[in-house]
Amino acid sequence: MALTVLLVEDEDRIASFIRRGLEAEGYRVMTASDGESGLTMGSSPSVDLIVLDLMLPAMSGEDVLVGLRSRRPDVPIIVLTAKHTVPDRVANLNAGADDYVTKPFSFSELLARVRARLRPRSQADATTLVVGDVTLDLLSRRATIDGREASLTTREFTLLDAFMRHAGQVLSETQLLDLVWGYDFDPESNVVEVYVGYLRKKLRPDVIETIRGAGYRFRG
């Protein structure tokens, strides 16, 4: 049975972006567009994780967070907000948030945090991805191919991570923009093509296949 994520977000564009991405990963997604609805829906034991925006109508996200913690002390809550100062982070973590993602964000970052919070506690954390001849160490953030190390920038690392988690699948440029650059990036940009070129140079030209008219496929 699919795990259920409650998304409490009043901006339709962001809510649609997150919902599409999570549903594509196999999660069941419920949405609430104001704080009162979020508190009511999040109180249900059928909800496995909550992604909570802080700037909400009807009731602030901070008040929703406190209310949810009193009703469901064990449900994972990931706060999603434009507030990014250290005092903001500390205040919300102290109020009961399990994690904190600041806007703008890439979907791959949010997805990684959702997966981590929903992973069974008894399950050892996967720290390495291996596809074909490519190995990606998630802790040291190092990539190796054919036994040699490839030095990657932060964005290149995130793009390679997205490719390796979807190895064998054809990913469109729009999907890659969503996964790596986030919801507010210009869809007309050629940044995906540019960064695919960077990875091919640093890894090997044939590890990423261009599927004409459709996107790219990682072969490893």
Image: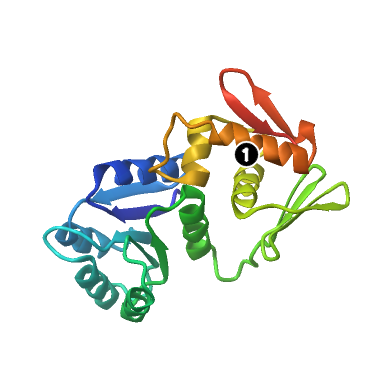
Q: Looking at the picture, how far across and down is residue 105, in whole percent?
A: 43, 53
In this rendering, is residue 69 above or below 104?
A: below
Q: Quadrant of residue 57?
A: bottom left
Label 1 sits on residue: 195
Looking at the image, residue 92 sits to the left or right of residue 21; the answer is left
Q: Looking at the picture, how far across and down is residue 46, in whole percent?
A: 33, 58
Point out the residue furthest to the right here: 147
**Residue at (11% x, 60% y) in the render:** 58
Crowd class of label 1 (few under 14; some 14 to 19; many from 20; radius 10 Å): some
Residue 189 versus residue 31: which sits nearer the camera? 189
**Residue at (66% x, 31% y) in the render:** 217
In this rendering, is residue 67 above or below 131?
A: below
Dot 1: what SS? helix
Please state which amino acid type lies under the numbered disc 1. Tyr
Q: Looking at the picture, how far across and down is residue 68, in whole percent?
A: 26, 71
**Residue at (77% x, 51% y) in the render:** 135
Residue 143 versus residue 69: which sits nearer the camera? 143
